């Protein structure tokens, strides 16, 4: 027989107030939320359009009632799975930067030719946005290219070996001014210019690229390859197209000194349409046959008397552009 227990057991529930979040944590959370909304909105719109197109098509065919509904294209599905499984989104671009690039890609229609320097967290997004066009990636890392190709069958990604370094940026600017092989209009496949990239597949030099995005290679230290060659190469590709055509060229991390000075020297300040966050947007027209600025690329030549600062391991290396 159980005896009655006169002692009362008291259970207390303590309320733990959440730790106050730092302003940086709140900003990061808001950034991730905006990115998720962007991805979700884009793919929802794309899927809705796909279903709408399918329903319109079904009214024009007698046998379509028994056909299954159209599914998302493989590149779009892969991107959707990639971004929804990423927590938090490890992106280097802001919502406004992503939107700006996406809008321009979309404006070129379903047959857009898109060339991208650098494999980043946004790579699948660009491929999915341009899933009906042609998207080609160029990166300095053989491992990254191989892994990206294995994870995404059918993707076009190619390795490039850069011979430049950030510490050489000022010398290369002086060098190109005196070298006829660094002219604005040429076939880079046969070029000996040290700033030009000439070891990519032949078709890269034959396609008229509608949009070029420069988001690589590394350029944060003096021994990094820097983005001097991609900027120069993009300018030549745009200038060498058929007369009357234009190319949208985006330079990410435009706020860094080398990216800004090289962009103004080769993509030209007069072609700078907008700066969104850390993204420079240029619209470069093909050169006229009679157009000539010597070996220069722009009507208004950029002054090269600035000082570059390359940071490596906390040390600063300062080199004047006009130094010998």
Image (tube, rainbow, N blue to C red):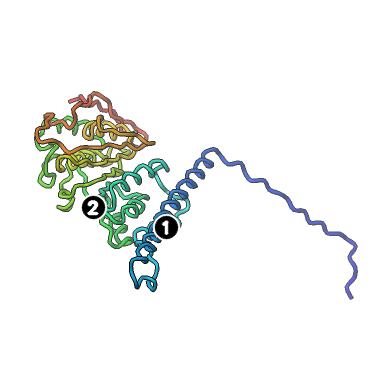
Secondary element under disc 1, as helix, strand or loop, is helix
Asked if residue 185 lies left or right of residue 269, the reply is: left
The residue under label 1 is 48
**Disc 2 on helix, strand or loop?**
strand
Residue 278 position in % (x across, y down):
36, 36
- The x and y percentages for residue 194 are 15, 39
Residue at x-position 11% and y-position 31%: 292
> Is 80 left, or right, of 155 in this rendering?
right
Q: Quadrant location of the N terminus? A: bottom right
Viewer-closest of 109 and 202: 109
Give x and y (percent) for residue 303.
Answer: 22, 24
Q: Residues within 10 Å of mark 1 (few under 14, many from 20)?
A: few
Residue 94 screen position, x and y as percent: 41, 42
- Tell me which residue sits at (37%, 36%) in the image: 276
| Relative side of 172 to 181, left or right | right
Q: Furthest-bottom residue in view?
A: 1
Task: Tell me what residue is drawn at x 34 percent, y 59 percent.
Answer: 75
Numbered label attached to residue 159: 2
The reply to whether the C-beta atoms of the residues labelled 2 and 1 are less than 8 Å apart is no
Q: CA distance from mark 2 to mark 1?
A: 36 Å
Of marks 2 and 1, which one's residue comes earlier in the chain? Answer: 1
Q: Give residue 195's quadrant in the image.
A: top left
Of the 4 image quadrants, the one containing the C terminus is: top left
């Amino acid at each position: 027989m159980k005896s009655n227990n006169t002692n009362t057991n008291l259970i207390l529930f303590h309320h733990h107030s959440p730790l106050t979040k730092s302003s940086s944590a709140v900003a990061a959370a808001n950034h991730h939320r905006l990115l998720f909304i962007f991805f979700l909105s884009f793919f929802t719109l794309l899927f809705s359009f796909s279903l709408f197109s399918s329903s319109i098509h079904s009214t024009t065919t007698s046998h379509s009632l028994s056909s299954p509904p159209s599914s998302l294209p493989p590149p779009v599905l892969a991107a959707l799975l990639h971004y929804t499984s990423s927590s938090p989104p490890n992106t280097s671009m802001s919502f406004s930067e992503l939107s700006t690039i996406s809008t321009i890609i979309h404006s070129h229609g379903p047959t857009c030719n898109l060339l991208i320097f650098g494999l980043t967290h946004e790579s699948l997004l660009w491929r999915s946005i341009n899933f009906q066009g042609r998207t080609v990636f160029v990166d300095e890392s053989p491992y990254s290219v191989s892994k990206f190709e294995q994870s995404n069958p059918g993707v076009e990604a190619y390795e490039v070996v850069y011979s430049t370094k950030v510490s050489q940026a000022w010398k290369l600017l002086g060098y190109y001014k005196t070298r006829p092989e660094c002219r604005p209009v040429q076939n880079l496949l046969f070029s000996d210019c040290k700033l030009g990239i000439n070891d990519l597949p032949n078709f890269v030099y034959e396609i008229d690229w509608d949009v070029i995005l420069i988001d690589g290679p590394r350029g944060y230290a003096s021994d990094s390859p820097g983005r001097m060659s991609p900027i120069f190469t993009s300018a030549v590709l745009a200038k060498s197209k058929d007369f009357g055509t234009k190319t949208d060229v985006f330079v990410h991390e435009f706020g860094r000194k080398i990216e800004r000075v090289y962009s103004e020297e080769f993509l030209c300040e007069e072609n700078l349409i907008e700066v969104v966050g850390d993204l420079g947007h240029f619209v470069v027209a093909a050169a006229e046959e009679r157009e000539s600025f010597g070996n220069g690329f722009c009507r208004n030549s950029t002054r090269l008397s600035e000082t570059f600062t390359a940071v490596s391991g906390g040390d600063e290396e300062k080199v004047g552009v006009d130094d010998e």
